[in-house]
Amino acid sequence: MLMPKKTKHRKQHKLGRGGKASRKVDISFGSYGLKSLSAHWITSRQIEAARRVITRYIKRGGKLWIRIFPDKSVTVKGGEIPMGKGKGSVDHYVAIVKPGMIMFEMDGVSEQAAKEALIFASHKLPIKCRFIKK
């Protein structure tokens, strides 16, 4: 699973900042992309599931770029623990995705194959997505 090798601070605030994406809004590397239409936290497990679907569908042909990285830590306290006693331990990492962000890019395959692979990948993600091309 994806996670940072090293972080300056182990635990982070939740920070629910809204708004549209201002970075990662254009296709930079490939010819086809998967663009988010809503905001959500995407876990490293969901990114990995989408990546596996894409690589299996294109049978390891072409090139895939993952434009999002889960660098935000999410903490969880154990079950049946009383209130107080500090913040829980780090459980998993998420990537913050805003509307308009390009999450995956592809190249080296036909448009039809790229479209189907990215649409199958979007079913693994908790947000609405759109297939776009350069």
Image: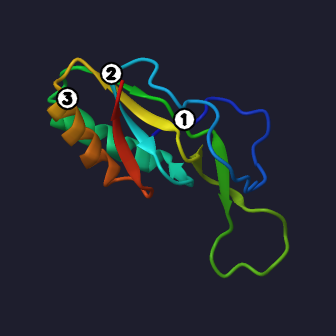
Determine the image quadrant of residue 83: bottom right
Dot label at residue 111: 3
Please tell me whether mark 1 sits on a helix, a strand or a loop.
loop
Q: CA distance from mark 1 to mark 2?
A: 20 Å
Q: Nearer the viewer, mark 1 or mark 3?
A: 3
The N terminus, quarter of image: top left
Residues 81 and 68: in front is 68
Question: Mark 3 or mark 2: which comes first in sequence?
Answer: 2
Question: At 34% across and 44% down in the image, what residue appears?
Answer: 50
Please tell me whether mark 3 sits on a helix, a strand or a loop.
helix
Mark 3: which amino acid?
Glu
Q: Which residue is mark 1?
A: 69
Q: Which residue is mark 2?
A: 31
Mark 1: which amino acid?
Phe
Q: Nearer the viewer, mark 1 or mark 2?
A: 2
Is label 3 in contact with label 2 (beta carbons under 8 Å)?
Answer: yes
Q: CA distance from mark 1 to mark 3?
A: 25 Å
Colouring mode (rainbow / by chain / secondary structure / one colour) = rainbow
